[in-house]
Image: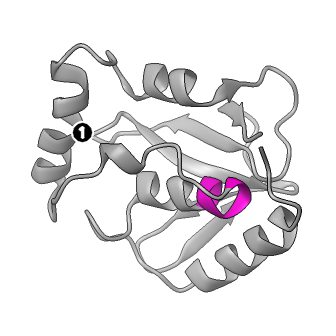
Amino acid sequence: MKLPSWKKDLRAYLYSCRDKGFCWGSWDCLKFVNGAVKVQCGVGFADDWFGSYSTARGAALNYAKITRYGIYNNIIEGLDDRLKRSDNKAKTGSIVAIKSDSDVLGYSLGVKVEDTVALVGDNSLLFINLNNFMTWSVE
């Protein structure tokens, strides 16, 4: 359930993240979206998915632990299990996934913010207008 102050808290979270650049294990797309859910609901959806990693290979091995044991075949199944897939237009605070060239997840994860999607970039958050993505509501 969303906290009463979720909108204000999400804005503050995005502001605090604005100058963080991508870094495996400390600031990557999964950590970013998990944090967005945490400020909206009080708990992240993927808190138990994180291990210790600092490289793409380490992230892939960490991610493989989840899929290797048959929990999920891919990140999309994991999101479907933990969040409610939304076929309607994404609302502010929703989690989105877009296909990417990532060798780790195969997707980039972001947060819907009004008419844009916030994604973790190399040096800061990126706010991009996207039309083609999957979305999960945060309730």
Q: Is residue 11 magenta?
A: no
User: Residue at coordinates 47% horizontally, 81% vertically from top-left?
Assistant: 20
Q: Which residue is mark 1?
A: 103
Q: Quadrant of the C terminus?
A: top right
User: Residue at coordinates 47% horizontally, 45% vertically from top-left?
Assistant: 108
The answer to which of 126 and 65 lies nearer the viewer is 65
Q: Is residue 56 above or below residue 15?
A: above
Please identify the quarter of the rendering in which residue 86 is found.
top right
| Relative to 116, 119 lies left or right | left
Residue 107 placement (x, y as % from top left): 44, 37
Q: Is residue 38 magenta?
A: yes
User: Residue at coordinates 14% horizontally, 60% vertically from top-left?
Assistant: 55
Please identify the quarter of the rendering in which residue 101 is found.
top left
Label 1: how many Cα within 10 Å (few below 14, some 14–19, many 20+): few
The answer to which of 7 and 105 lies nearer the viewer is 7
Q: Quadrant of the N terminus?
A: top right
Q: Is residue 12 above or below residue 45?
A: below
**Magenta segment, prevailing SS (helix, strand or loop):** helix
Color style of the picture: one colour
Residue 121 placement (x, y as % from top left): 48, 68
Residue 137 placement (x, y as % from top left): 75, 36
Q: Amino acid at mark 1?
A: Asp
Magenta residue span: 36-41
| Relative to 68, 30 lies left or right | right
Q: Is residue 130 above or below residue 9?
A: above
The answer to which of 43 and 102 lies nearer the viewer is 43
Q: Secondary structure at mark 1?
A: loop
* Number of on-image labels: 1
Q: Is residue 6 above or below residue 65?
A: below
